[in-house]
Amino acid sequence: MSEPLRRRRGSAAALLGCAALALAACGSQADTRPAAAPAPSPPPVQRAALPGDVSPAAAPAPGPVRRVTLQGGLVAQLDPRARELTLRDATGEAIAREPAGAGPAQLATDGEGIVWVTDAQLDALLVFRVERVEQVERVEQVEPELTLTRRMALPGVPWALVHDAPRERLWITLTARNEVADVLATDRPGVIGTYDTLRAPRAIDVDPAGRITVRTDRLVHTVDPRGIELGPPPPPDLE
């Protein structure tokens, strides 16, 4: 089964859903929304054979990734209910906080200075940068800063994501479309392509050999990277 995953076109139903949500929000008195959750999976459609192997899951899909480690012992921790991203030092003390959209779901990092967060409510990928700012008069004191630098539209209720360092990619599950998005992993990300996968993809991982594993509570889909036609990177963002 070596046929590459085929790309899919978006649906006009997403536009109707956005309009319905906007109407429902009118007149609300307080923000009492719960934390974001994966979208219900759409019904299956007829499609080409998927590359890789699909097998029964030995255990439920792993829980959401909401804590990652960066260089220097720093930790980025996502709080979906508070809708905040917190930066902590090696002792666990909070040293910076930033709002993280309307429905933050999960996060990933390059291990250095970039943290990506999926926003399931706004259909977006948020990009944060962690930078150390040296104080001019007291150079020995270096304080990390956390800044939201970019918000990229990503329709389809983005949920789980993983950083594929060797290929400089992010693989992101789109639970409302049964797809995986191939995204350039930089501080200016861009969508390279989207590919069909299992229904209701809740977790995704990449092993050292580059094999991509998509998981649901019932199935595991393992894809050899040679079975995917990786497109060229998108043109640079000149904004």
Image (spheres, rainbow, N blue to C red):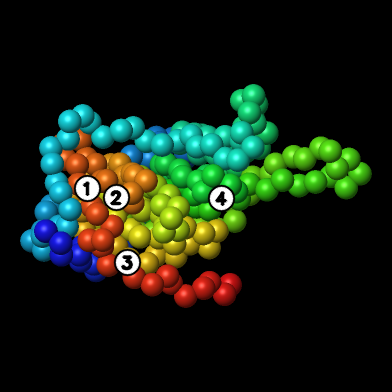
Q: Secondary structure at mark 2?
A: loop
How far apart, in angstroms, are the residues tagged by discs 2 and 3? Answer: 14 Å
| Viewer-side label of 2, 4 | 2
Q: Secondary structure at mark 1?
A: strand
The residue drawn where x is 45% and y is 43% is 107
- The image shows residue 237 at horizontal and vertical percentages of 53, 72
For residue 53, the mark is none
Q: Mark 4 or mark 3: which comes first in sequence? A: 4
Q: Nearer the viewer, residue 205 or 211?
A: 211
Looking at the rendered structure, the kind of residue marked 2 is Arg
How far apart, in angstroms, are the residues tagged by discs 1 and 3? Answer: 16 Å
Q: Mark 2 or mark 3: which comes first in sequence? A: 2
Q: Quadrant of the N terminus?
A: bottom left
**Image position of 204 (left or right of 126):** left
The residue to which callout 4 is attached is 114
Q: Secondary structure at mark 3?
A: loop
- The image shows residue 135 at horizontal and vertical percentages of 84, 44
The residue to which callout 2 is attached is 211
